[in-house]
Image: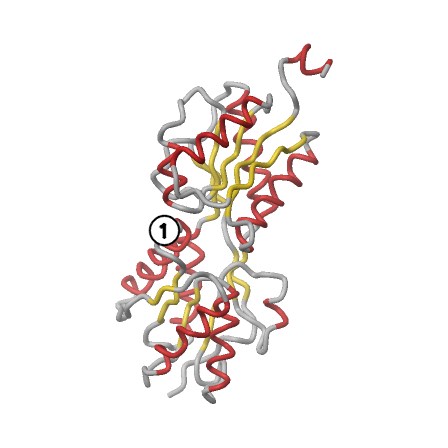
Amino acid sequence: MARALVTGRSKTIGVVSSDTTFYGPASTLFGIERAAYDAGYAVSVSSLRSVSSRNVVLDAIQQLLDQGVDGVAVIAPLRSGVDALRHVSPDVPVVALEAGQNATVPVATVDQRAGAAAATRHLLSLGHKTVWHLAGPADWQEAEERILGWKTALEAAGAPVPPVLRGDWTARSGYELGEALLDNDNLTAVFVGNDQMALGLLRRLREAGREVPRDISLVGFDDIPEAAYFTPPLTTVRQDFSELGRRCLKLLLSKVEGEEHPGRVVVAPELVVRESTGAARC
């Protein structure tokens, strides 16, 4: 308290989060907390059940500011969260994470398009004529960015673009969507929007007697800790949440201090090749 009176800073940042039952938002939150701790900052978290209302997000930001935090990071994977940020005054120290291309506040993000494109190009390089995609929910920014990366890579290669199948990030939805994929006799490769859905799809393919990667190659996204222990171990796109947390904190503190800062900082993803991808069958 004495330091805050002298410096005008509380050495505390606020984080508005939601959907932390999912791996991505939970890991993003952890990355911010770890970066803040390393920099000598405490973290106050406002965890929302939903960001479906603009006022819910704005109220959470204001409550954290009223508590005396130096600035607020908003984990905004949903479009509704990004829309709420349009109503934040430019002089308020707020940054967003994973907020898509059209955010009106500074953003720290993993390059979702690049990760999806790398996954798609990897499958095409193995001789697959096209790649199907199981995507996340339509209101998630990351799902839309991954669709764009996948589609761009297919179009650049002159490959057919199959219809997108939508899940809800859960293993169950991957399992259920597998039924639609099995109706396609020419299916040889699938890029799945996250590793949990890939896990569900793996089970459904196994039940149908389709072997991975002999019959179908599979790539996920996130590189959850269990991905290396799937059967077979999953080829996937790794997001560096620790680096994302560091970039976010640096961006936020620059805004708090009124310093020049980039409007957007991007962390590169990494394709991790394991045993779930192989050459296309003849």
Image quarter where the N terminus lies is top right
Question: Relative to residue 230, is residue 246 depicted above or below?
Answer: above
**Which residue has dot 1 on it?**
139
Q: Is residue 224 left or right of residue 146?
A: right
Horizontal and vertical percent for residue 81?
A: 41, 40
Q: Amino acid at mark 1?
A: Asp
> In the figure, 172 relative to 72: above or below?
below
Judged from the image, the secondary structure of the residue bearing numbered disc 1 is loop
Relative vertical location of residue 267 with respect to residue 230 in this rendering, above or below: above
- Determine crowd level at label 1: few under 14, some 14-19, many 20+ residues with C-alpha closer than 10 A: some
Furthest residue to the top? 6
Q: Position of residue 52 (x, y in %)?
A: 39, 43
Tell me the residue at 59%/50% (across/down).
27
The residue shown at (50%, 41%) is 75
In this orientation, which residue lies closer to the viewer: 35 or 88?
88
Q: What kind of colouring is applied to the model shown?
A: secondary structure
